[in-house]
Amino acid sequence: MRDAFHDDLDAINQTLVDMANLVGSAMNRATTALLTADLALAEEVIAEDDHIDAIQHDLDAKTLNLMARQQPVASDLRTLVTSLRMSADFERMGDFCHHIARIARMRYPATAVPPELALTIQEMGDTAERIIAKVTGLLTSRDLEAALEVERDDDEMDRLHRKLFVTLLDDAWPHGIESAIDMTLLGRYYERCADHAVSVARRVYFLVTGEYATKKD
């Protein structure tokens, strides 16, 4: 029975890895759709969000069932509790990819991002993908140093977010209120997606050590 229990724990972790991979792919495609006005790609990301939601609901139900049947303690209990929280983080990250794709769809056939901000948005998308890839690896490696690095990676996203606002707040902004609102929302979606990835990294650290990580400079 103990072997079966640990097989169940491994299956839960693999499902989290699968969710992370789906979110990473969604982020890539949402950013591409946004910058190229690719309606079909945007629709893919929007539709796939329902799949990510369904995986989360199924995973949480299995996790709660396992907790009720096995009444785990110590590290096994930490594994199950953190799994519930990480699945919620990945679900929210999928939502932000969905929101990015919706802006691409809403502005089609125009490109939602003004030319002078295209590079910044591409960098935000690349940074989000890089952070998501790192936390995906953490789910199997449990590398504590890598977990601490994620917060430093998030500093780059924060820098890009500030850079975006410098452009938006310039008195010479020529694209009007509607575009400024779009860009404000987009900046928020990328920034919050990275924040949830940081949350996953912190949970991995807690899972391994039983303690909460403190940020390193």
Image (tube, grey):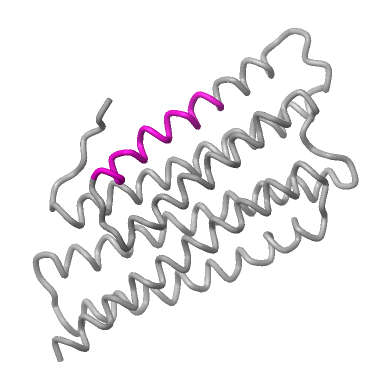
Vertical placement of 92 versus 146: above or below?
A: below
Give the number of callouts.
Answer: 0
- Residue 48, how many percent across, how many down? 64, 66
Q: Residue furthest right?
A: 109
User: Magenta segment range?
Assistant: 145-160
In the rendered image, which quarter is residue 85 located in?
A: bottom left
Instruction: Look at the image and tell me in which quarter the N terminus lies.
Output: bottom left
Q: Is 152 included in the stretch rendered in magenta?
A: yes
Q: Which residue is rendered at x = 58% and y = 49% of the image?
A: 96
Is 159 drawn above or below residue 93 in the view shown? above
Q: Nearer the viewer, residue 30 or 94?
A: 30
Chief SS of the magenta region: helix
Horizontal side, residue 2 vs residue 107: left or right: left
Q: Residue furthest left?
A: 74
Q: Where does residue 24 sit, x and y in percent of width and height?
A: 54, 55
Which residue is located at x 21 percent, y 76 percent?
Answer: 67
Q: Residue 114: which quarter of the image? A: top right
Q: Is residue 7 above or below residue 23?
A: below
Question: Which is nearer the eye, 146 or 117?
Answer: 146
Task: Determine whether, in the image, residue 83 is placed left or right of residue 103.
Answer: left
Q: In the rendered image of this protein, does residue 162 appear above or below residue 210?
A: above
Residue 89 position in % (x across, y down) = 42, 54
Residue that sits furthest to the bottom in the current view = 1
Task: Give left or right: position of 99 versus 68.
Answer: right
Q: Residue at x 78, y 9 (%)?
A: 172
Residue beneath the point at 53% across and 39% down = 127
What residue occupies the far top of the structure in this picture?
171
> Quadrant where the C terminus lies?
top left
